[in-house]
Amino acid sequence: MKIKALGLEEIRSVDWNVEKECIQLIDQRLIPFDFKINDYNTTIDVCKAIQTMVVRGAPAIGATAAYGIVVALKEVENYEVSDKKSKLDEKLKQLLATRPTAVDLVNFALETYQTAIKTNFSIEETLLKAELLANEMVKDCTQIGIYGEELINDGDTVLTHCNAGPMATIDKGTALAPIFRANEKGKNVKVLVDETRPRLQGAKITAWELEQEGIDHYIISDSAASFLMSKRQVDKVILGADRCLKDGTVSNKIGTLSLAVNAKYFGIPFYSAFPWTTLDKESKSMEEFEIEYRNEDEIKYITSAKEKILVANLNSKALNPAFDITPAELITGYITPDGILSKEDLMKK
Amino acid sequence: MKIKALGLEEIRSVDWNVEKECIQLIDQRLIPFDFKINDYNTTIDVCKAIQTMVVRGAPAIGATAAYGIVVALKEVENYEVSDKKSKLDEKLKQLLATRPTAVDLVNFALETYQTAIKTNFSIEETLLKAELLANEMVKDCTQIGIYGEELINDGDTVLTHCNAGPMATIDKGTALAPIFRANEKGKNVKVLVDETRPRLQGAKITAWELEQEGIDHYIISDSAASFLMSKRQVDKVILGADRCLKDGTVSNKIGTLSLAVNAKYFGIPFYSAFPWTTLDKESKSMEEFEIEYRNEDEIKYITSAKEKILVANLNSKALNPAFDITPAELITGYITPDGILSKEDLMKK
């Protein structure tokens, strides 16, 4: 990802700093108001970063958890060999408990953990594994961009929700990758960005990322999408995914289902873009996962960088489901590193 | 409307103060953070109050415009008889230009204006007409409550959007009237309140009104409605309307269409509640009306009482349609002062 305003040509939202031997995260809570990179070198701080959404987006959380295992390994380095595994297990458990919905978190953390065990707690080997996973993710996103770009015609308006750009995915993005690539190839593409209440990742992060690439875009209220679809001002809807089952059911940021239902009603193609780590081959039904209800203050207060102001009736309660579940019948296709797939194609994976 | 916290037993959002000879408006921009009643005695200030949303909601705007004609009449009182009509016409035009979508504004203003002309500019007679229109509106809303209450079963959860309560309608409300009445009759009713971006009238005003009546309610993000419908946590959707054509097409606050499409998909009854002034018997198509696009700062900034903070990427543009259009095929029924009507019933009106 390049950040024009700061003259940064190549930067990832999650990275390992070799000199400082720590994780570096772009603090996504500050975007677009401020730009800050934080260092993390304890498991507890890594967990806090995930929970407080310094880092967000399933693949970026996954990479953070992978590097988090390296951090954990460094913490237990001087323990007795007999204690090491139990201590590492404890830290793994802490990492896994940070967010219940994101499948990448579990996969990345477990794969890196297994390398640690297999290599007899080798920090070097485990770091290599974490780096490999991060690099594979970036390569997957590049492929998503290559395949997804073919769906975008010159002059198209694409609607997206939340943030499935470079910040969410280490680099390149999932839903945004095809848009970036279409723009690079000289296609004229306009983006409608759902602001994405309650945390406003669209208005804040996606809009900021599109600005870095110089792509024409408009922020809209989430509930304006339907009206703009009805007026034929949306050609395609492309979103990311937090988890996709083999039957094509997708769980993703709250608001996804509503967009998919509307896109179906108005006959507008709806695509879900994701890397292979997002495909959950084991689970039979999304009912197995409890939808995360986050704190009601996310609804009742709105946060801009450091300010937090009440925007609702103080004595009212709020309900704050963070994700929803979209059935395959509402999804036109899945943009993956192997191409644009149908529900039937996913079944064979 | 009673406002428990302030010990007010009977107050209207729009009223005429006989002693001060001026319009009194509850400043709805301050709700729920502060409670203030403002006096208005010039046409220019009345127009500003409508434009800056001191008063909002089609019927409340209508009543304000009706009393606004009385204010205008007082302003031209000392003009030569030959000048009076042209001066009054000018002020009528100013009032009509304040908001393009609300049908009540036009009807209330014109009816009161015609009384002024017919009675040879009698302030007293014109005020009586304005009062009559306001009282009829409150009576209509009472009837909406009586009929709509029958739709609500004990234990129901009703979802609503924006504000169609007493503040929007002088008193009683449209969408909220059936809920208030069900509660009065001892039915157990829970309300899901869409926060309603960009201006958050749901989180601010509807939630506050429900609190005054002691009704159990939860504020939700607009885009969470679909998920809660999919989980069968919504029994009915009841909204107000800004304008309804004889073919049953409804224009209303942005987000209405999205809810209607989702309610249809999930098989949940969707009702539009409105008084007769909202029925536009003349227009053939909503295409005749340009949808109002309000300032993009409503999207990019969020306002809480007096604070206004940036919540989006500063250099991005925003698109801010204020209303949308819902076709009759998505609407289960129309809750009117004459009962629950079908599209076919409306045709006969």
Image (spheres, coloured by chain):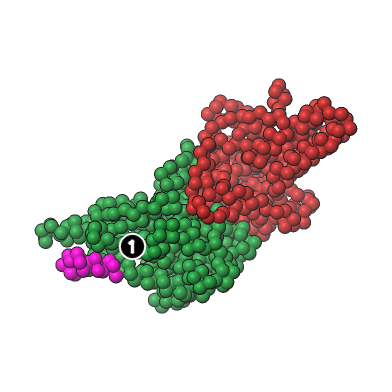
Chain colours: A green, B red
Q: Which residues are magenta?
A: A116-132
Q: Amino acid at mark 1?
A: Gly
- Residue at image coords 19%, 56%: A75
With B138 as the anchor, is B296 left or right in this view? Answer: left
The one nearer the camera, A44 or A82, is A44
Q: Position of residue B97 (x, y in %)?
A: 73, 44
Q: Is residue B20 visible?
A: yes
B258 in relation to B205, above or below: below
Q: Position of residue A36 (x, y in %)?
A: 36, 52
- Residue at image coords 62%, 32%: B26
Q: Main secondary structure of the magenta part?
A: helix
Q: Quadrant of residue A308?
A: top left
- Does the magenta segment cover residue A123? yes
> How crowded is the residue under tag 1: few (<14 C-alpha within 10 Å), some, or many (20+)?
many
The one nearer the camera, B139 or A341, is A341
Q: How many marks?
A: 1
Could you say whether the residue bearing mark 1 is in a helix, strand or loop?
helix
The subunit carrying tag 1 is A
